[in-house]
Image (tube, grey):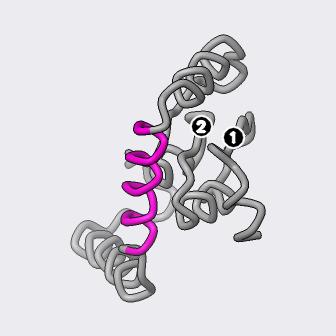
Amino acid sequence: MPAIYAACDAVVVPSVWLEPFGLVAAEALASERPVVASSVGGLPEVVQGGGRLVAPGDEAALENALRDLSHNPALRQQLGAHGRRAMLALTWEKAASEVEAVYRSCLRSPVAIGSRA
């Protein structure tokens, strides 16, 4: 996959599904390629400043984002570099720490099963 990503100017993830994470976007960003993705599920969190987000199914917005990137190599490089730094910052330790923080937050304010919190 690294060779395929290296051959791309940008990677498009036009998902209409609620992607829980967006592995393709993460791999592209780790390969220093900007991503144009739908703003659904976990994609916005993955893509952040490493690309452009468009509304799912908005073909005109997708076209405009790709056109902007195709005409601006400096922007592609900037977004790709930002995306790679973001992906390199993802670690198991960080993920575990964030999950632990969520659990601790839940323990501080328990909700009874069946209640309408």
The residues colored magenta run 74-88
Q: Kindly identify which residue carries mark 2.
A: 36
The relative height of residue 66 versus residue 117 in the rendered view (above or below) is above
The image quadrant that residue 18 belongs to is top right
Q: Kindly identify which residue carries mark 1.
A: 12
Q: Position of residue 54 (x, y in %)?
A: 56, 26
- Is disc 1 surrounded by few (<14), some (14 to 19) or many (20+) residues within 10 Å? many
Q: Which residue is drawn at 63% across and 65% down?
A: 27
Q: Which kind of residue does numbered mark 2 sit on?
A: Val
Reading the chain from its start, which is encountered first: label 1 or label 2? 1
Q: Are marks 1 and 2 in contact (CB under 8 Å)?
A: yes
Quadrant of the rendering where the N terminus is positioned: bottom right
Residue 26 is marked as none
Residue 59 as seen in the image, left or right of residue 53: right
Q: Which of the pair 13/96 is nearer the observer?
A: 13
The relative height of residue 109 versus residue 114 in the rendered view (above or below) is below
Q: Which of the pair 115/24 is nearer the observer?
A: 24
The relative height of residue 34 versus residue 1 in the rendered view (above or below) is above
